[in-house]
Image: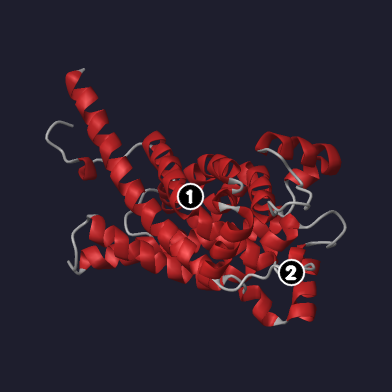
């Protein structure tokens, strides 16, 4: 082990999961206002505007929220968001390489199909664990902090209790099917695209395996992911935020959107989605690579001392 670079030694599963969870939390804290703006734009149109407030564009939405609800409103649901990433990213990103190796039997250079299968698998697994945190996050982001407007929830823990008491376990796992679909798409697109772009850059020696390479790979992954996953993301957000009885199912939600608002409704909030996913991917993957390397260096130093 002595004399090897951290990049020469495959990081153990615990290091990858911890690095992924920490990096995703950093990315969430940086990009959360964009995610909140995306949610507000996505649910706009499903019910009458409160106080005649209309959102126009990502920066217009952020500006309107600051003016009408204060800057803190941009971070509604952050606690649930961080809880979600600790459960979610550590599984979907941290387990990706291991699941990929499982499907290939440990062989090098896995095919695109194997990478897609691994991304879909870890994405679906992560939703199973983290769905309640996602439901609470979306509902907090959707609720408005206006005088005279009743708030659905006062705190994160109160939201979990309220949903369980009034909607049961099904309420906490509401929207699991569209969320599994969405995150399977997001995960396989995000990780596979990042994987392929990074490998191509390194193979053609355009950049070395450092921050610029990670930046370019993450930006490309964010754009491709947004294009593919946006329609499912809008349906997921609408359905999870809806009160009991508004929609019979996620499919009914999608059909209602199509018939009442037209096909463009599925790309509501596309710009904030791209700004959020692009910036989130950049912060997350750059942080992930650096945290992973730092943890490996620390691990090697401890082993040398021992």
| Image quarter hosting the C terminus | top left
Look at the image and tell me whether residue 290 can be seen: yes
User: Residue 295, how many percent across, how many down?
Assistant: 30, 35
- Mark number for residue 43? none
103 left or right of 257 in image = left
Residue nearest the observer in this picture, 25 or 88: 25
Picture mark count: 2
Mark 2, residue position: 52
At a point 25% along the width and 56% down the height, the residue shown is: 211
Residue nearest the observer in this picture, 136 or 21: 136
How packed mark 2 is, by other alpha carbons closer than 10 Å (few <14, some 14-19, many 20 or more), is few
Disc 1 element: helix
Looking at this view, name the residue that lies furthest to the right: 245
Q: Picture quarter containing residue 244?
A: bottom right
Q: Picture quarter containing residue 129?
A: top right
Look at the image and tell me whether residue 10 can be seen: no
Q: Earlier in the sequence, mark 1 or mark 2?
A: 1
Indicate whether 67 appears above or below 206: above
User: Residue 187, how many percent across, how many down?
Assistant: 50, 58
Looking at this view, name the residue that lies furthest to the left: 3
How packed mark 1 is, by other alpha carbons closer than 10 Å (few <14, some 14-19, many 20 or more), is many
Residue nearest the observer in this picture, 23 or 201: 23
Q: Are marks 1 and 2 in contact (CB under 8 Å)?
A: no
Indicate whether 243 appears above or below 255: above
Mark 1, residue position: 28
Disc 2 element: helix
29 left or right of 212 in image = right
| Image quarter hosting the N terminus | top left
At a point 32% along the width and 41% down the height, the residue shown is: 291
At a point 61% along the width and 46% down the height, the residue shown is: 77
Indicate whether 252 appears above or below 289: below
At a point 40% along the width and 49% down the height, the residue shown is: 97
């Amino acid at each position: 082990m002595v004399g090897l670079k951290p990049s020469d030694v495959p990081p153990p599963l615990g290091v990858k999961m911890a690095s992924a969870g920490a990096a995703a939390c950093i990315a969430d804290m940086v990009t959360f206002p964009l995610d909140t703006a995306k949610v507000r734009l996505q649910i706009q149109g499903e019910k009458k505007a409160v106080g005649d407030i209309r959102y126009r564009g990502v920066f217009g939405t952020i500006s309107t929220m600051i003016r009408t609800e204060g800057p803190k409103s941009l971070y509604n649901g952050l606690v649930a968001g961080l809880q979600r990433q600790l459960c979610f990213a550590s599984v979907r990103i941290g387990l990706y390489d291991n699941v990929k190796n499982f499907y290939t039997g440990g062989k090098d250079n896995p095919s695109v199909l194997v990478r897609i299968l691994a991304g879909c698998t870890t994405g679906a697994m992560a939703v199973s664990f983290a769905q309640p945190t996602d439901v609470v996050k979306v509902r907090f982001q959707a609720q408005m902090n206006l005088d005279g407007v009743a708030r659905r929830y006062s705190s994160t823990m109160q939201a979990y209790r309220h949903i369980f008491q009034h909607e049961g376990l099904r309420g906490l796992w509401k929207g699991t099917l569209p969320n599994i679909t969405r995150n399977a798409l997001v995960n396989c697109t995000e990780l596979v695209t990042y994987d392929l772009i990074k490998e191509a850059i390194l193979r053609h020696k355009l950049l070395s395996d450092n921050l610029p390479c990670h930046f370019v790979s993450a930006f490309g992954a964010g754009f491709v992911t947004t294009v593919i996953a946006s329609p499912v993301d809008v349906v997921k957000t609408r359905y999870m935020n809806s009160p009991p009885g508004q929609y019979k199912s996620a499919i009914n939600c999608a059909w209602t959107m199509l018939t009442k608002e037209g096909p463009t409704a599925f790309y509501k909030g596309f710009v904030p989605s791209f700004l959020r996913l692009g910036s989130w991917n950049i912060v997350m993957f750059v942080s992930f690579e650096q945290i992973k390397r730092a943890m490996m260096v620390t691990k090697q130093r401890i082993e040398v001392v021992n």
